[in-house]
Image (cartoon, rainbow, N blue to C red):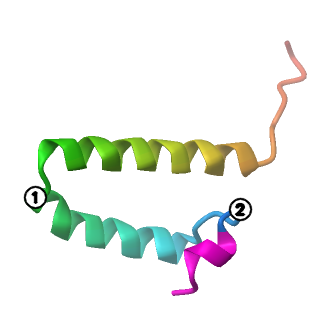
Amino acid sequence: MPSRSLRKSAPLSDAEAESLRLQLLEIIPRLRRHQLLDLADTLHEAARERRSGEPRHFDMRV
């Protein structure tokens, strides 16, 4: 997988996201509460960045 530091502004591809999901399923049961909260915050921020990069679809009916 390419270095994420080189691609900070590029969203994960579907294959990268699936690979990350599978890795998380393996490690999440071993994390402590504060680590889970940090992970949740990081994932939330990544999802927000991914959504902000998607084209907006405006509803013209409004």
Quadrant in the rendering for residue 22 = bottom left
In the image, taking residue 45 as reference, residue 61 lies left or right, namely right
Q: Is residue 8 above or below residue 15?
A: above
Residue farthest to the bottom, as pictured: 1
Q: Which residues are magenta?
A: 1-7
Is residue 49 toward the left or the right of residue 38 in the image? right
> What residue is shown at x 81% (from left), y 47% (from top)?
55
User: Would you say the residues marked 1 and 2 are in contact, meaning their CB atoms lie under 8 Å apart?
Assistant: no
Task: Tell me if residue 62 is in the magenta stretch.
Answer: no
Q: Secondary structure at mark 1?
A: helix
Q: Quadrant of the C terminus?
A: top right
> Which residue appears at 69% of the width and 66% of the height?
10
Q: Position of residue 1 (x, y in %)?
A: 51, 87
Residue density around tag 2, few if under 14, some if 14–19, many if 20 or more, within 10 Å: few
Q: Amino acid at mark 1?
A: Pro
Where 51 sits versus 24, above or below? above
Determine the residue positioned at 43% across, 49% down. Answer: 43
Residue lying farthest to the right in this orientation: 60
Q: Quadrant of residue 14?
A: bottom right
Nearest the eye: 55 or 2: 2
**Residue drawn 28% across the image and 72% down it:** 23
Instruction: Find residue 27 and report its horizontal and vertical position in percent.
Output: 18, 66
Which residue is under mark 1? 29
Q: CA distance from mark 1 to mark 2?
A: 30 Å
What's under tag 2, amino acid-wise?
Answer: Ser
How many other residues sit within 10 Å of disc 1, few (<14), some (14-19) or many (≥20)?
Answer: few
Tag 2 residue: 9
